Amino acid sequence: MKKVIALILVAVLAVGMLAACGTSTSTDASVSSSAASTDSAKGTDTAASGQLIGVAMPTQSLQRWNQDGANLKKELEGKGYKVDLQYANNDVNTQIQQIENMIVKGSKVLVIAAIDCSALSDVLKKAADNSVKVISYDRLIMKTPNVDYYATFDNFKVGVIQGQYIETKLGLKDGKGPFNIELFGGSPDDNNANYFFDGAYSILKPYIDSGKLVVTSGQKDFAKIAIQGWDSAKAQARMDNLITANYAGGKKLDAVLSPNDSLAIGIVASLKNAGYGSSDKPYPIITGQDCDKPNVIAMINGQQSMSIFKDTRTLASKVVEMIDSLLQGKEAPVYDTKTYDNESKVVPSFLCEPVYADKDNYKKILVDSGYYKESDLK
Ligand code: BGC
């Protein structure tokens, strides 16, 4: 009887998991992840039976990738898989070598968050020659047919939410303005960076066209505003230059579009050095993404305004589901078979829903969902 109840519980939670990625809030997401771990805790999956899964992550320098790797490892091992988890210090050649090793060691599936999305064609040809399946993780691997699935958050929507946050906080819809804004983009070798910018720009462009938002520096093209390697120091240096060249003599900066938290860290540091953060010179609206701990603390302290929350537990659960399907020769559940063209094929994709956190809702989004403890955020 106990067993039957347990099975029903797992089934109900598993349905919740599907719903979480398709539509919902991060609170749902946390339910879903506990569902997955309940399931995986049993460690009895026959598809797994000790098979090796290679997990290639870009860098340990950003909190999110550490969490992504740890979540994947935990869930996969819980199901009975072996895991080769590697970080490549944001170095493209190191990542290629790590993937090559994973193939040599007999990995059945590779989960890859690419550093340079267009640099993996040769190594993935080797994977295909060895019948190794490939899941593109978070970032779409470009220019190769040898990618089976893509699991990510809705990247365009990430940008849309950032743009809408600026729109709301400045009161642009109510006709307020003009306001001064500066724009930042992510790393040009990361395919996601274009989606983030396009999403945000789709919201901001009408206001820029009408003059209600003024990009004082005039720098609006992605190529001009992109920050190689998502590097905080490079973002800080660009913000320093923008301030010196355009905001001398007390001109006020009202908003900064930052695509993620590592850039926001650099932007805030630069603004702080320039005297922002006092009552007569408050910080502008500054966006971000990942809800890294230092950034959530910066939100609570009024330096950064918001950050997109992408619950990495949800993404990990979805990827484990994909791996199970691939190894059982079944089709994985995917919702989008049209959008993500990697210039070689349309890669079947599963998109999880991003939400935003700010100082008003972070307790509900980040603490109540079990993602952080309140004590982590001091
Ligand atoms: C990810 C972001 C992350 C950025 C820098 C992007 O591809 O989607 O979550 O902040 O890379 O690592």
Image (tube, rainbow, N blue to C red):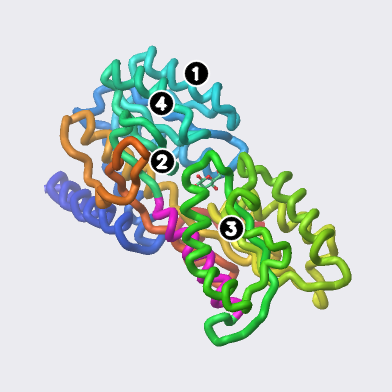
**Circle 1 Cα neighbour tier, 10 Å, few/some/many (<14 / 14–19 / ≥20):** few
| Residue 66, above or below 84 | below
Magenta-span inclusion, residue 23: no
Residue 168, quarter of picture: bottom right
Magenta-span inclusion, residue 162: yes
Residue at label 3? 288
How far across and how far down the image is residue 353, in percent?
Answer: 38, 58
Is 47 positioned to the left or the right of 75 in the image? left
Is 354 positioned to the left or the right of 130 in the image? right
Real-space Cα distance between discs 2 and 1? 19 Å
| Residue 140 disc label | 2
How far across and how far down the image is residue 209, in percent?
Answer: 57, 73
Q: Earlier in the sequence, mark 4 or mark 3?
A: 4
Q: Which residues are magenta?
A: 153-170
**Is label 4 in a helix, a strand or a loop?**
helix
Residue at label 1? 97
Real-space Cα distance between discs 2 and 3? 21 Å
